[in-house]
Amino acid sequence: MVRPHRLFGTNGIRGIVNRELTPEYAARIAEAIGTFFNQGNILVGYDGRTSNIMLAYAVTSGLLSTACKIYDAGMVPTPCIQYAVNNHGMDGGVMITASHNPPEYNGIKVMWRDGVEISGQQEREIEELFFRKRVKFSSWNNIGQRRLLPGILNEYKESIKQHINVVEIRKRHFHIAVDAGNGVGSLVTPYLARDLGCKVTTINGDIDGTFPERLSEPRPENLRKLATTVKAIGADVGVAFDGDADRSIFVDDAGKIQWGDRSFALIEEDFLKTNHGETIVTPVSSSQVVKDIADRYEGKVVWTKVGSTIVSHTMKRLKTKLGGEENGGVFYGPHQPVRDGAMSTALILGIMAKTDETLSELFDNLPRYYLVKDKMACPIEQMINVLESLTEEVSHLNPERIDGVKLWFTDNSSILIRPSGTEPIYRFYAEAKTKARAIEIVKEYKEKLQHLISP
């Protein structure tokens, strides 16, 4: 969602294609991006949405007009672009994607030279150039050049294998079911898994920007087909991706869909066993299980606002090696401090091989919390006032204000209520020791919020 007087939301620039995000608008944004990079070398890629080529060409045109040299990566996952920007010594990168948003959306993500999305300050610099019309166009005889950059899918795949025990995984001959969600996740993980000696069953593998088989966001209610497939074929693990394959949600061998912070907790525990006392970065929306695991190994948890760029930049600032989100984002710093669905999949396979336990057994060993997520529409012009009113209404409960409003209750349950940075909605994350209690909390606070939204 493109906010008034802001281009960037929580995760890049988003908008409905040909309504908010037209080719002309994308080109103008790219002119500001190109001016910001000052005639630099920029890698451009896109996911499988229906408007990908249209917007990629518009963005490329805008960048070329400012004398940037463009390298075209073609259709790739977002973490592949991020790896290649750093690996090829680019000055920056631009990815055309709306990640998990519905098919009518698309967006623009901007990466710095290390592959991490640009900081909030850098976003504001681009917005200043855009809104104040301070773009620096090149002369007619200094227009930028465009070149293809082939082969980065394989480079990215091979780079992941450097961070896992390939031989150990190959010995296990795992069977993995991959649900690409008709997105670009089908371009890397099935081939990576075969390289790791796995039998691979792929569903929703055809890239189709209309997302005909399921919604792009890998939420449990969208993954019933994957869960059924895992059980039917006797797979050891299932994994589902969002549209640009930076997020991954896992299904265990019993066909149970696991939230992202639980699969992250498995990766966290494996990491802390050999990195005692390290710092873990995660948003305030994550489960208490992340802290429980950190406490086992004298680790420290740094809670952040929700947003993958915030996690990445916190990791950079603190020089930490691991971060994760409840939505399926895992940031494995030794590879790159960004969300990476293929890397997450390789790490889970490595843990299964190392422990010689089934995935369901590994999950059963974790502390148990029940998480219920929901959302509610809210007119964008009311978002700030609604949050202020809610904060005042619950002030007697000592709310935490890291991001939105988070409340802790005496029975070890909690709820986070926060405005989305990409859509005109409020998100609810309730956690408790029983599912019924989590559902009850969400219901109570959705009703509270509804009363605060003007008709």
Image (tube, rainbow, N blue to C red):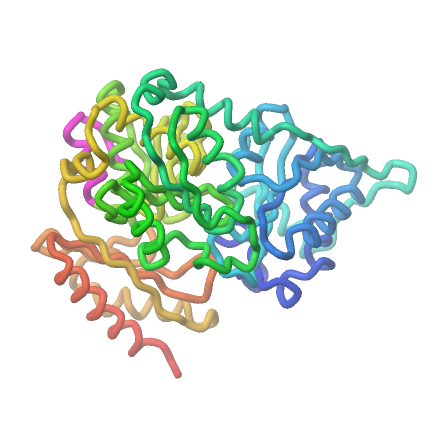
> Where residue 308 appears, x then y in whole percent?
43, 43
Q: Nearer the viewer, residue 274 or 155?
A: 155
Work out whether 434 lies above or below 378. Answer: above
Please, which residue is most extreme toward the bottom here? 455
Work out whether 339 lies above or below 389. Answer: above
**Residue 2 visible in this rendered orientation of the protein:** no
The C terminus - image quarter:
bottom left
Q: In percent of the image, x 57 and y 55: which residue is there?
A: 209
**Span of residues in magenta:** 288-301
Q: Count the marks.
A: 0
Work out whether 163 lies above or below 81. Answer: above
Q: In percent of the image, x 51 and y 54: which residue is there?
A: 9
Which quadrant holds residue 136? top right
**Residue 336 visible in this rendered orientation of the protein:** yes
Q: Nearer the viewer, residue 158 or 293?
A: 158
Please, which residue is most extreme toward the right here? 141
